[in-house]
Image (cartoon, rainbow, N blue to C red):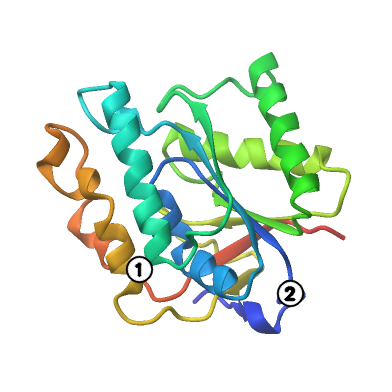
Amino acid sequence: MVKVEPLVQSRWASARWLVLAPHPDDETLGAGALIAHCAAQDRLGMIAFLTDGTGSHLETTPRVAVTRRKEARHALGRLGAQAVPTIWMGWCDAHPHPIDSNPFMREAGRLAALLRWRRIDAIAVSDHSEAHCDHVAAFRLAEAAVHRAKRPVALFAYHVWGEAPRLARHIATPAMPVGQRRQALLAHRSQISPVMGDGFRLPREKRRMAARDVLTLRRDCR
């Protein structure tokens, strides 16, 4: 069994966080409890979405991107984070910039500037162990940005499609109110219904989400 330390009793109890999501809906699936807790405590500095989310459907048009942005805004509202600054980095879904390429480095610099500007102490991002290329790219981008941030920023990973590794340090958020994360996920109608036509459908087992998030420390800020 993975051992975890409660966030509220950890060194990061008063940290200011940035959540980086590879796609709209990953914020709820992977970090919904963190978002809700930190937003309520005024310790959520920013939420960033890496891709436009259009790869989830056969119709890869601006209409899909606009729909998924609206869904994400509704989900964040249901998590209590409607007032938190949000940016869309605009990467093409399922076609991340190669690591160490010029576009990747520019984006790492952009994210590092946001870490400084928003006075971020810890960033939560999808783990590098996940299978989807955008989840791995998001982690690598966060990792590169932390190195360039010119301020101490801890790097934590959340787990959407994988499990928290046993041999690592973990923190756990407080539990969310019953039903809050599910209501946030239901805002992502394009991912759980045919409203946008043929495309990805979130498996039913993934819709049964835990009340808390377990985050894996991947890089300490000390």
Mark 2 neighbour class, 10 Å CA radius: few under 14, some 14 to 19, many 20 or more:
some
Q: Which residue is mark 1?
A: 181
Answer above or below: position of 33 versus 147: below
Residue 31 on image: x %, y %: 49, 61
**Amino acid type of the residue that numbered disc 2 sits on in the rendered structure:** Ser
**Amino acid type of the residue that numbered disc 1 sits on in the rendered structure:** Arg
Image side of residue 57 versus residue 172, left or right? left
Q: Residue at x 51, y 24 (%)?
A: 96
Mark 1 neighbour class, 10 Å CA radius: few under 14, some 14 to 19, many 20 or more:
many
Which mark identifies residue 45?
Answer: none
Judged from the image, the secondary structure of the residue bearing numbered disc 1 is: helix
Q: CA distance from mark 1 to mark 2?
A: 23 Å
Answer above or below: position of 80 versus 75: below
Judged from the image, the secondary structure of the residue bearing numbered disc 2 is: loop
Image side of residue 167 versus residue 181, left or right? right
Outermost residue to the bottom: 9
Q: Nearer the viewer, residue 116 or 93?
A: 116
Q: Quadrant of residue 157?
A: bottom right
Q: Quadrant of residue 140?
A: top right
Q: Residue at x 43, y 58 (%)?
A: 76
Answer above or below: position of 97 versus 201: above
Residue 192 on image: x %, y %: 19, 50
Q: Are marks 1 and 2 in contact (CB under 8 Å)?
A: no
Residue 55 on image: x %, y %: 32, 28
Which mark identifies residue 14?
Answer: 2
Q: Nearer the viewer, residue 191 or 46?
A: 46
Answer above or below: position of 191 versus 160: above
Mark 1 vs 2, N-terminal side: 2
Residue 182 on image: x %, y %: 28, 67
Q: Residue 25: in sight, yes or no?
A: no
Q: Residue at x 58, y 51 (%)?
A: 85
Q: Residue 39: in sight, yes or no?
A: yes
